[in-house]
Amino acid sequence: MTTQKTLLKDAYKKISCDFNRIVIKVGSSVLTNDIGINVERILHLAQEISKILKTGKKVVLISSGAVAYGFKKIGFSARPKDMAKLQAAAAIGQPGLMNVYEDAFSAYGYITAQVLLTASDVYQRRQYLNATTTLKTLLDWNVLPIVNENDTIATDELKFGDNDTLGSLVASMIEADLFINLSDIDGLYTADPRTTADAKQICLVEAITPNLFKIAGKAGQIGSGGMFTKITAAQRLSRVGISSIIASGQQDGTLSSIFNGIPTGTLFLAKKAEIPQRKSWIAFTHHAQGKIIIDEGATDALLNRGKSLLPSGVCDVVGHFAKDDAICVEDTNGQTIAIGLTNYNDEDLRIIMGHNSKDIQKLLKTNGETEVIHRDNMVLADPTLQTAKQGEIL
């Protein structure tokens, strides 16, 4: 029987030898201090990442810190809460943050590139593909892309929400081998180690269970994400076959240890990829604009027989949405079944729900798609978990 120690040893050996495309996310709590940006920490990260690059591996860096840098620079003692102030702080902080990175990496002979994304940039398929191509081209040129959310123009409705989510999206976009989430805590524990003396570190997670979310800590004071969002990111990536590590960004040598095959932090071993690349675009970038309730027969057809959703299986329609919007699919017990791109707006779907597909033309006075959601445009929810907000498929 394979022990956890052996699994860890083998996994880290594979990371050091075989994993060649890496996404590293660094949180605000790692990059900032009382006076603004922690330049010393960035210099150390640049040194470690440069060592990784010299081995021929490709790295994308997801960097928080622009908002924190901005509000500290203009003298605020705490992170602003309203959108206008957050956007203004980001506008102040982003240039300074990138200047620090550019100076730090140029000392090792590496060129950096700033990539700012909003959810709207990747919501449309063409824009998503353009962003993916840009990132992969930069990697081919041995340039280090430094990615952040474009906080200056993002709105509440079109925000990733935190850089854990953004990092998991980018890792999926570039088909990374590994996502490293550097935080102010050195991994996942059985309880919050800052308040619980006997909390034990969890070094290896083979399967993400509801219990892991129960022990997730709350968001920190400076950053926008917490342990919950980090576990969520790891779970999403596991479904597309990408492993994740949560480790300390405040301790020297963390990245060096990982790529020297030394178990560090908490490793989330990926499952075999369940979601193909195109479907990961639906799962990672779309938030449901509404939802539909389906009957038992339709639920069985989706979950067990790999079928598309037909209008005959729809019991109810909730909310307002347009054709091609993402909508959430629930069973009659309120369990999330899937998210998918609808072929009908809510008004037309209310007319044809419960009817046979052959009746669509008569009911709508026009030709329409046979399916409400085609299986190629649908992602099933993880059947072991129901921790997400409506429309998020984990």
Image (cartoon, rainbow, N blue to C red):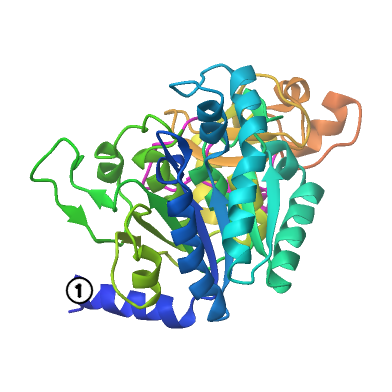
* Pointer 1 residue: 5
Range covered by the magenta-colored residues: 373-394
Q: Position of residue 149 (x, y in %)?
A: 63, 40
Is residue 363 part of the magenta span, yes or no?
Answer: no
Say which element carries label 1.
helix
**Which residue is found at the position 79% from the left and 38% from the top?**
358
Q: Between residue 274 and residue 159, name the one nearer to us.
A: 159
Q: Position of residue 344 (x, y in %)?
A: 77, 32
- Residue 151 sits in which quadrant? top right
- The answer to whether residue 26 is seen in the rendering is yes
Is residue 386 part of the magenta span, yes or no?
Answer: yes
Looking at the picture, which amino acid does disc 1 mark? Lys
**Which residue is found at the position 59% from the left and 54% from the top?**
101
**Which residue is found at the position 36% from the left and 78% from the top?**
260
Q: Position of residue 309 (x, y in %)?
A: 64, 42
In the image, residue 308 sits, relative to residue 19, either above or below, namely above
In the image, residue 113 sits, relative to residue 55, either above or below, namely above
The crowd level at tag 1 (other Cα within 10 Å; few <14, some 14-19, many 20+) is few
Q: How many tags in the picture?
A: 1
Q: Relative to residue 348, is residue 269 drawn left or right?
A: left
Q: Relative to residue 260, is residue 223 drawn left or right?
A: right
Residue found at the very far left of the displayed protein: 198
Q: Between residue 88 and residue 6, name the one nearer to us.
A: 88
Q: Quadrant of the N terminus?
A: bottom left
Q: Between residue 262 and residue 256, name the one nearer to us.
A: 256
- The answer to whether residue 290 is seen in the rendering is no
**Which residue is found at the position 65% from the left and 50% from the top?**
281
Q: Between residue 11 and residue 312, name the one nearer to us.
A: 11
Residue found at the very far right of the displayed protein: 366
